[in-house]
């Protein structure tokens, strides 16, 4: 039996940049044509099982030609690919985790007030991330998000967050604990749907790529491919 293959595609959330959907339809189509070469048997998306019925309903409407895709990466990327390959459904693998104890904003506020030198370090790494981003088009944006160098630099930010606080107030660690719980759950949810010989396309926010790849690699249960291997 062959291990299931997972293609990790990091994406931005299109609702935050609706101009991409409005003005870059050709680029969206280029991405779809490139991803067809993977021949997915399943498509997993960053949605919670709590909205699975709604997801199924919308996908059925799309298949019937009655749904105009919204500013949503699932509807723009996953629906057309699933329809093309005649897949019966999509798989929601996200997890609802309370990310408010503390919030990320509270972590940054603590660092700004109590650890200004560390706060400056974090801002400098974030600045370097912005400089690595090429947002001139959807194609270049997706390449930036999925670039190993970019992913590694983003992880530097998270590791610096572990230093926010002190021994009595592990502010940064507590926020990252919530983040790791979410990515561990996503990895578990993905593993539960995987079967031998599957080819699973995972469409997920770029921030999740580092941990998700690590968890899947550590399991040694998957063959892992990256978006850049197929990117137009």
Image: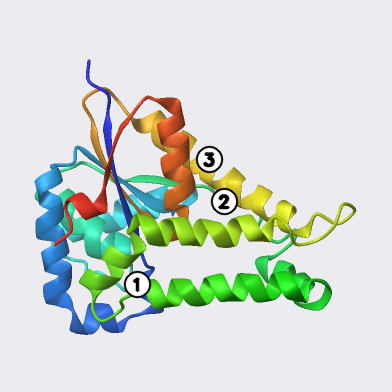
As helix, strand or loop, the secondary structure at mark 2 comes to loop
Q: CA distance from mark 3 to mark 2?
A: 9 Å
Q: CA distance from mark 1 to mark 2?
A: 20 Å
- Mark 3 highlights which residue? 185
Q: Is residue 26 left or right of residue 97?
A: left
Report x, y in % for residue 39. 13, 42
Q: Earlier in the sequence, mark 3 or mark 2?
A: 2
- Mark 1 highlights which residue? 14
| Category of crowding for the residue at label 2, using alpha-carbon neighbours closer than 10 angstroms: few (below 14), some (14–19), many (at least 20) | few
Q: CA distance from mark 3 to mark 1?
A: 24 Å
The quadrant in which the N terminus is found is top left
Report x, y in % for residue 194. 33, 30
Report x, y in % for residue 23. 19, 84
Q: Nearer the viewer, residue 14 or 109?
A: 109
Front: mark 1 or 2: 1
As helix, strand or loop, the secondary structure at mark 3 comes to helix
Cβ–Cβ under 8 Å for marks 1 and 2:
no
- Mark 2 highlights which residue? 96
In the figure, 167 relative to 14: above or below? above
Q: Determine if residue 10 is in view.
A: yes
Q: Is residue 220 left or right of residue 228?
A: right
Q: Is residue 69 left or right of residue 26?
A: right
């Amino acid at each position: 039996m062959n291990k299931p293959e997972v293609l990790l595609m990091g994406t931005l959330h299109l609702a935050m940049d609706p101009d991409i959907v409005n003005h870059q339809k050709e680029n969206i189509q280029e991405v779809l044509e490139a991803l067809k070469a993977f021949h997915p048997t399943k498509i997993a998306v960053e949605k919670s099982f709590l909205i699975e019925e709604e997801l199924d309903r919308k996908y059925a409407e799309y298949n019937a030609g009655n749904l105009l895709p919204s500013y949503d990466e699932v509807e723009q990327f996953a629906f057309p690919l699933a329809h093309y390959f005649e897949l019966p459904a999509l798989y929601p693998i996200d997890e609802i985790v309370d990310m408010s104890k503390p919030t990320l904003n509270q972590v940054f506020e603590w660092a700004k007030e109590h650890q200004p030198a560390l706060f400056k370090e974090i801002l400098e790494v974030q600045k370097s991330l912005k400089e690595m981003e090429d947002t001139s088009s959807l194609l270049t944006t997706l390449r930036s998000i999925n670039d190993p160098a970019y992913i590694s630099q983003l992880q530097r930010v998270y590791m610096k967050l572990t230093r926010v606080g002190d021994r009595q107030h592990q502010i940064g660690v507590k926020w990252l604990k919530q983040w790791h719980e979410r990515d561990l759950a996503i990895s578990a949810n993905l593993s539960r749907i995987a079967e031998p010989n599957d080819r699973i396309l995972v469409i997920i926010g770029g921030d999740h790529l580092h941990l998700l790849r690590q968890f899947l690699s550590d399991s040694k249960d998957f063959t892992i491919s990256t978006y850049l291997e197929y990117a137009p």
